[in-house]
Amino acid sequence: MKTERLKDDRSETIYYSDKCLAKKYSVCKATIWRWVKSGALPKPFKFSGGSTRWKNSDIVEFENSLGK
């Protein structure tokens, strides 16, 4: 699974694309966006250049809320 690593001042943060999350959960990208729209999945961050990504820490929190 391809992830993007962007550094901040304190640590390295991992970001996931919709494609990565779809693969991780074995669903299509449209399902990822439906989950966002319904509030089930956290909203992603939008970066310059049209890139949209989810922070790993937000995804871990989402999974913990599901009891995984």
Image (spheres, rainbow, N blue to C red):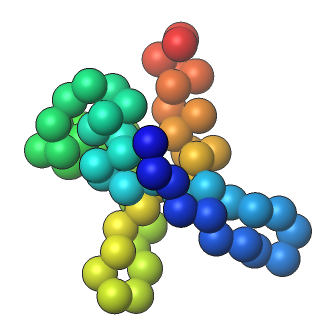
* Vertical position of residue 54 compared to residue 26: above or below: below
In-image side of 21 versus 64 (left or right): left
* Vertical position of residue 14 compared to residue 63: above or below: below
Is residue 49 in view?
A: yes
Q: Nearer the viewer, residue 23 or 39?
A: 23
The quarter of the displayed image where residue 12 is located = bottom right
For image coordinates 36% across by 41% down, the residue present is: 21
In-image side of 24 versus 38 (left or right): right
Q: Which quadrant, please, contains the N terminus? A: top left
For image coordinates 42% across by 61% down, the residue present is: 53
In-image side of 30 versus 18 (left or right): left
Is residue 39 in view?
A: no
The quarter of the displayed image where residue 29 is located = top left
| Total numbered labels placed on residues in the image | 0
Percent x, y of residue 17? 37, 55
Percent x, y of residue 51? 35, 75
Q: Nearer the viewer, residue 2 or 67?
A: 2
* Vertical position of residue 27 compared to residue 36: above or below: above
Q: Which residue ends up furthest to the front in the rendered image? A: 1
For image coordinates 53% across by 13% down, the residue present is: 68
Q: Which residue ends up furthest to the top in the rendered image? A: 67
Q: Which residue ends up furthest to the bottom in the rendered image? A: 49
For image coordinates 52% across by 39% down, the residue present is: 59
Percent x, y of residue 23? 31, 35
